[in-house]
Each structure stands twice: as C-alpha cells, then as structure tokens.
Amino acid sequence: PRRRNYDEEEARRGQAVFAANCASCHVGGNLTDNNAGVLHAPSETGMDSAYAVRTSQKRYRTTPLRGLWQHPPYFHDGRAETLEDVVAHYVRVRKLQLNEGQRKDLVEYLKSL
C-alpha cells in the first residue's frame, strides 16, 4: 500500500474548512450521506449526468472519503487527477469562498482521512 503523506498542522486547519463547507453531505464514520439514502442530482454535484442516468435513481451518491487519497483519479469518470482538482471543482461548483491557503489545508485534511 502507498504511504500517506500530509502536513498535520495544515490538516488540522483543513478539518475546520471541511466542517464549514463539506460536512453537510460528507457525514458519519465514512464521511458520506449515502448510508442515509441521500442521493444527489447531477446539477448539485457539477458532474455530467452520463453516469447517473445509468442508475435506477438517476442520481449520484456522496463518495465515502476514508482512504480517498489511495484511489486517484477521482469522480465517476476520473476527470480529477488530484485532490487539488477535486477541491477546485467544488470551489467552482458550490461557489465556496476559499483562499489558496484554505484550499491547501482542505487537501491536507482529505489526505489525512
């Protein structure tokens, strides 16, 4: 297995960024709301509906985040090569007001999971 590398101080700050911006969907032990049966329309995620239409509900589940750092590329179609790409996507789609430091801290937090 790959060794996870992250900055502990940045990850600690990133946890606060996560709590303020991501924790409404990424909840519980695996940091996903899909255990509660919550699914999201493609428009909520900023993703193409091509993969969602293949499912019975035509929606996406919230990806569990534990060990996420081990499984690039990200998203259903692999369009995000790095966790930085994932964060940039959601900053754009969800119109999150995160500065570069907060983005970096959030990435470090994701690496710590």
Image (cartoon, helix red, strand yellow):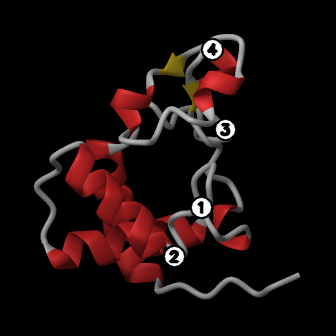
Report the residue at 72% width, 67% height from top: 71
Mark sitting earlier along the chain (1/3): 3
Occupied quadrant, residue 9: bottom left
Q: Nearer the viewer, mark 1 or mark 3?
A: 1
Badge 1, how many Cα within 10 Å: few under 14, some, many 20+? some
2 or 4: tag closer to the N-terminus: 4
Q: Which residue is mark 2?
A: 82
Q: Position of residue 44 (x, y in %)?
A: 35, 29
Q: Residues within 10 Å of mark 3 (few under 14, many from 20)?
A: few
Dot 2: few (<14), some (14–19), or many (≥20) neighbours within 10 Å?
A: some
- Circle 4 packing at 10 Å, graded few (<14), some (14-19), many (20+), is few
Q: Is 83 in front, or is 48?
A: 48
Residue name at image x 23 percent, y 42 percent: 94
| Badge 4 or badge 1: first in the primary sequence | 4
Q: Which residue is mark 3?
A: 29
Give residue 60's position: percent from left, percent from top: 57, 29
At label 3, which amino acid type do we have? Gly
Question: In this rendering, is residue 41 above or below 66?
Answer: above
Is residue 24 visible in the rendered image? The answer is no
- Label located before the other in sequence (1 or 2): 1
Q: Marks 2 and 4, Cα distance to the nearest angstrom?
A: 28 Å
- Kindly indicate whether the residue at mark 2 contacts the one at mark 1 (C-beta within 8 angstroms): yes
**Mark 1 = which residue?**
74
Query: Separation of disc 3 and disc 4 at Cα?
Result: 12 Å
Q: Secondary structure at mark 2?
A: loop
Residue with the most extreme right position: 1
Tell me the quarter of the image containing the N terminus.
Answer: bottom right
Give the residue number, with chain letter if any, for mark 4: 36
Pointer 3 or 4: first along the chain: 3
